[in-house]
Structures are given as C-alpha cells and as structure tokens.
Image (cartoon, rainbow, N blue to C red):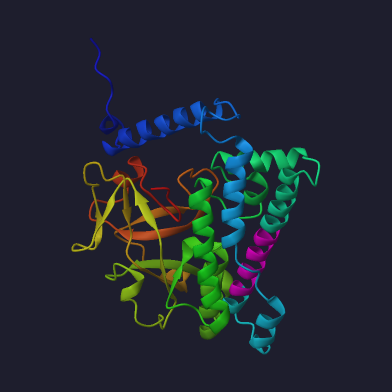
Amino acid sequence: TLKSETPTAYGLHPNAEIGFKLREAEAFCQSVLNLQPRTAGGEGGLSEEERAKQVLDDIVEKLPDIFDMEDIRNRCDGDFSPYTMVAIQEAERMNVVIVEMKRSLIELDLGLKGDLTMTGPMESLMSSLASNQTPGSWAILAYPSLRPLASWFLNLLQRYEQLVGWTSELAVPVSVWLSGLFNPQSFLTAVKQTTARRNEWPLDKTEVITEVTKRVSKEQVEAAARDGAYIHGLTMEGARWDEKAMCLEDSLPKQLFCPLPVILVKAVQVDRADIKDAYQTPVYTTEARFRQEVFTAQLKSKTGQLKWILAGVAAFLDVVL
C-alpha cells in the first residue's frame, strides 16, 4: 500500500499538516452551521431575530464615540509630522467604521421592532449578527480580518484604545501595535520620511529594515526608540524565534504559531542595508496571505534562506488563535 506523503517531503514542518486539518475542520463546521434552519431550534431555543437582537444590544452598548477630528487638528498647532498624520488618518478611518456600525444597527433595531420595513441589507446584517460573522458592510470599511464577529469587535475596541492614547498625547507610543492600524504601511512610510528628513536623504534611496529586540512584550519597552520606532503584535508561522540564540529555529511540535518579540523598525540608505545572514520574511495582514503583504522583515538565520522559503515561513499582523 502507498503511504501518505508527509509535509517534510515538501520541505514543510510537520505542524503544517495539523494546520491544514484544522482549517478543513473549521470550514466543514462553518458549512454545517450555515445549513442550520433560521427559526428557533426547539423548545427554549432562540430565533434568528432574537439572537441578532441580543448581539445588537451588546454592540450598541459598548460601541465608543467617534473621534473629534477638529479638536485633534487644532491641538496639532500646525505641526503635522509624518507620525501625527498617521494618527489623524487612522482616527478618520475608525470614525467611518463606527458611524456605519451605529447607523446600520439603529436601522436594524427599528426594523426588528416593526418601525421600518426590512430590506436586503438589513436582513444580511441580522443574519451576520445571529451567526457570529462580521457583516460585509462593516468589513469592507475596516481592515482585512478572518475573525468571527465577537473577536472582531473586541479587536476593534483594542484598536480604538491605542488611537485614544495616540491622539490625546499626539506623540508616538513607545511601542506601536502595528497590527492595530488600518494602514500599517503608512506608519512604515512615516518612519522612512522622518529619518530621511532628519538626515537629508532622498526618500527613494531609503528603505525600512527590522531588528528583533530582546524585549518579549511591549511592557518591557521603557522609552521610544531614538532612531526609528518599536512595533509589536507580529506572529510567525512555520518557524519560531529563539530568544536565547536570537535567530530562527524549527517550530516546536504542535506549536503552529510563535509570537515575535518587540521589533525595532528603522530606515537606512539602500546601499547600507545589511541583510546578510537574515531571512527576508514576508509579513502579511492575515493568515490568508494572498495579496496582503505589508512589508518584509529581516529575521536572523544560521541556516540560510532556502530552508525557510521551502517551509513557507511568514509573519502575520493578525492571527485567529
């Protein structure tokens, strides 16, 4: 009899098979849930409208207010640095999402009460709330995410909290939660612009490089970086980061993802970018990978790049654990 081919035959870590089976199981379970009847599931069960109403009330209660953009701009006092512009743009995009969420939820609430006629978009929103799926009308205004609704909303509130601190102080956080930005590329561009202006370098001759620090969590960062910026929140798949050897190593059995320590992002001139003994790690927004690459991180390796390329090693800003 023929034996099934193992992931190692293709240069992948054995954990890759575990990840594949988990994704298949999740897809199967989601399909089963989508086939369930929308009416009450028996004595004591809730109908789709009742489940949606519970979720709607919970979100409306916790949904924060929009940012006062006029106040933020006035406090800038004309000093619109690249980092300040990132904070303003992020707050504006957060406002767009919050406004749409409030509008659609109020509209659906009136529809459930019978004060408004239920439309197609309202029924779609109700179905999403009842099945713990992020509504498409919200997701298209937000950021790429594979999270179910409950986790997505909690993540949104965490992103909001980072922006509250950033816009109130108008100073870059000592370590930026890069995963919590709508447009993480804009922050990396701000690092380039700030460094290029200070050193009078041509922007097109400047590039961003990364350096993994020994700080495991953001709490260990005491002050902002003098050159560049600290970021955190990245997670790696296909390999792990050895905190003692400060380089890439094989994943541990059954450990599919490995959180990366705080990373220093800084800008250098292209001809001085030292990328020797480093794996050029693609960083994606979510596990979907496709068309979601944000930037390339340099992670030190003692075994060259080919091993990690074959293993499909990559980092993600947001992982559903």
Q: Residue at x 41, y 34 (%)?
A: 23
Q: Quadrant of residue 182?
A: bottom right
Query: Is residue 9 placed above or below 131 in the rendered structure?
Result: above
Name the magenta segment's main secondary structure.
helix
Whether 93 is among the magenta residues is: yes
- Residue 312 lies, in percent from the top left, at 37, 43
Residue 276 locus on image (x, y percent): 32, 61
Count of marks, rendered view? 0
Which residue appears at 32% of the width and 41% of the height? 311
Residue at 59% from the left image edge and 34% from the top image edge: 47
User: x, y (%) of residue 162?
Assistant: 50, 71
Q: Is residue 116 left or right of residue 214?
A: right
Camera-side residue: 105 or 183? Answer: 105
State which region is magenta. 86-99
Name the residue furthest bottom.
Answer: 77
Q: Is residue 233 magenta?
A: no
Q: Quadrant of the N terminus?
A: top left
Comparing 239 with 45, the one in front is 45
Q: Quadrant of residue 64?
A: bottom right
Residue reaching furthest to the top: 1
Q: With respect to residue 224, does 253 lie above or below?
A: above
* Residue 26 in sight: yes
Which of the pair 91/13 is nearer the observer? 91
On screen, residue 39 versus residue 112, left or right, reads left
User: Looking at the image, is 108 positioned above or below residue 16?
Assistant: below
Left or right: 77, with 268 as reference point: right
